[in-house]
């Protein structure tokens, strides 16, 4: 199974979870997701997801000037984003536990 | 490819998005790509793939919930539009409880291609009609046919391209409304035309038989009746100035029958003794010639002329003549009768 297909459905939660830890700019989010184990995550997917979540009103954003590199647009969760993360996390946990139950036999063998 | 070039290539690949949408999406793409590029010396194309692939991935990630972006991006008019759409969708949700509605609603999208064809047909024929200064419900020449087919093809092609927004959508809605009006107007015109076809009587003669039916209200004879229902004859009609009121039965194919009388009848003496104009014998209809049956509206029987005029005029005079004597006759005997007993009593009293 192509893990990018799985990722598509949960990228919103993953991005929200990373931002819940601390505010980040686009490429930092990509890096942190990859460090967390989602190595297949696409740069464009993360960038597009951030823009969409921002547009949907789940994120705040602010620009931080940087001396050595380009300006960085940081994103953080607002109340909408936090509520969305909580809801998605609950749903994911239930889903994951269902899947684990289904696949118990496979792991055992 | 440096970050700026790469970003521009991505923008180009997304150029079909509405301008405002595109700007929202890529507004800090340059900074982002610069960040990516700063991390490594490996060219961007190798790390991120081609700008087209990147754009496609961006589009997929960003376009997850198009309705949200639509509402926040557009102005008051669009918000009003989305409010209308919201009301409509709520009504749709309520109505969806009823299975017939669900079936109909599920069926309607299947009809969209049919509408595209009809729309193309109507608009193409409108242009054909305008350019040829004729009214064509069906293309009447090879050129018109080709143009109409091209119009249908274009309409279907536009219909198959989904996801238009902004002014293009507005334009398309206007075109749809115009096409809808055209279709309805065309149907009404064809229906009227059909109706005329039913009523029309084809004739080739000098006198239009159709007018008989059309002008059924036209008076060409008058039948006076008395209060008790007795038909009156030979009633002379005059207007307020004493002029005879006459009709023109000749126009309707009738002539005054002079056989009934010795002297020519008066034109204002009703009912007119009419008979079919012998000059118009045959009416040519579409399917060949047929002879018009000549029913006599006023039967002019031979015994009639002699007795009828005589009693009607004579008895009225003789009636008044006989009445006066009978009254005087009955009056006069009474005094003589009462006079008679008086003498008889007087002798008996003696």
Image (spheres, coloured by chain):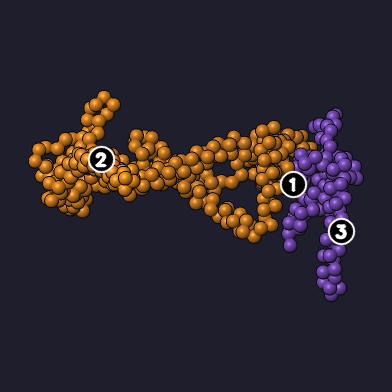
Percent across and percent down for residue B230 are 28, 47
Image point (41%, 37%), residue name? B127
Image point (12%, 46%), residue name? B306
Left or right position of B321 against B39? left
Mark 1–mark 3 distance (CA, rounded to whole Å): 23 Å
Residue under pointer 3:
A93
Residue under pointer 1:
A45
Image point (87%, 58%), residue name? A93
- Name the subunit of mark 1: A
Up the image or down, A71 lies above or below B65; here it is above
Q: Colour of chain B?
A: orange
Left or right position of B16 against B148? right
Q: Nearer the viewer, residue B65 or B350?
A: B350
Mark 3–mark 2 distance (CA, rounded to whole Å): 136 Å
Q: Nearer the viewer, residue B318 or B50?
A: B318
Percent across and percent down for residue B47 are 73, 46
Q: Residue furthest right?
A: A21
Q: Nearer the viewer, residue B50 or B310?
A: B310
Left or right position of B277 against B74? left
Mark 1–mark 2 distance (CA, rounded to whole Å): 136 Å
- Name the subunit of mark 2: B
Mark 3: which secondary structure? helix
Q: Colour of chain A?
A: purple
Numbered disc total: 3
Upstream in the sequence, badge 1 or badge 3?
A: 1
- Same chain, marks 3 and 2? no
């Amino acid at each position: 199974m192509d893990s990018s297909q799985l990722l598509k459905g949960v990228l919103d939660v993953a991005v929200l979870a990373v931002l819940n830890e601390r505010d980040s700019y686009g490429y930092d989010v990509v890096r942190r997701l990859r460090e967390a184990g989602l190595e297949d995550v696409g740069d464009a997917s993360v960038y597009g997801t951030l823009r969409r979540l921002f547009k949907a009103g789940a994120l705040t954003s602010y620009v931080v000037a940087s001396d050595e590199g380009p300006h960085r647009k940081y994103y953080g969760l607002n109340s909408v984003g936090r509520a969305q993360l909580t809801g998605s996390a609950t749903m994911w946990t239930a889903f994951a536990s269902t899947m684990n139950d289904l696949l118990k036999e496979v792991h055992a063998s | 490819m440096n970050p700026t070039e790469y970003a521009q290539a991505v923008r180009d690949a997304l150029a079909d998005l509405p301008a405002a949408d595109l700007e929202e999406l890529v507004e800090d793409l340059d900074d982002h790509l610069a960040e990516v590029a700063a991390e490594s010396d490996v060219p961007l194309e190798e790390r991120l793939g081609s700008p087209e692939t990147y754009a496609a991935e961006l589009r997929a990630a960003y376009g997850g919930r198009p309705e949200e972006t639509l509402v926040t991006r557009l102005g008051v008019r669009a918000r009003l539009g989305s409010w209308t759409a919201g009301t409509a969708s709520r009504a749709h949700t309520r109505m969806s409880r009823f299975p017939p509605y669900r079936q109909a609603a599920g069926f309607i999208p299947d009809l969209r291609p049919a509408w595209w064809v009809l729309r193309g047909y109507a608009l193409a024929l409108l242009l054909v009609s305008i350019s040829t200064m004729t009214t064509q419900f069906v293309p009447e020449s090879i050129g018109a046919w080709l143009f109409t087919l091209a119009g249908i093809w274009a309409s279907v092609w536009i219909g198959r391209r989904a996801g238009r927004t902004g002014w293009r959508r507005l334009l398309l809605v206007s075109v749809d409304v115009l096409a809808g009006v055209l279709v309805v107007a065309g149907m009404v015109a064809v229906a009227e035309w059909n109706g005329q076809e039913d009523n029309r009587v084809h004739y080739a003669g000098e006198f239009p038989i159709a007018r008989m039916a059309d002008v059924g209200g036209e008076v060409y004879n008058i039948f006076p009746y008395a209060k008790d229902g007795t038909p009156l004859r030979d009633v002379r009609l005059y207007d307020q100035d004493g002029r005879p009121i006459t009709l023109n039965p000749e126009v309707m194919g009738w002539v005054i029958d002079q056989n009934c009388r010795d002297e020519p009848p008066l034109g204002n003496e009703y009912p007119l003794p009419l008979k079919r104009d012998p000059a118009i014998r045959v009416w040519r209809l579409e399917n060949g010639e047929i002879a018009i049956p000549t029913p006599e509206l006023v039967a002019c029987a031979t015994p009639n002329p002699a007795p009828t005029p005589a009693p009607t005029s004579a008895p009225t005079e003789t009636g008044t003549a006989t009445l006066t004597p009978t009254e005087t006759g009955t009056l006069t005997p009474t005094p003589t009768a009462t006079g008679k007993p008086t003498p008889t009593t007087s002798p008996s009293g003696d």
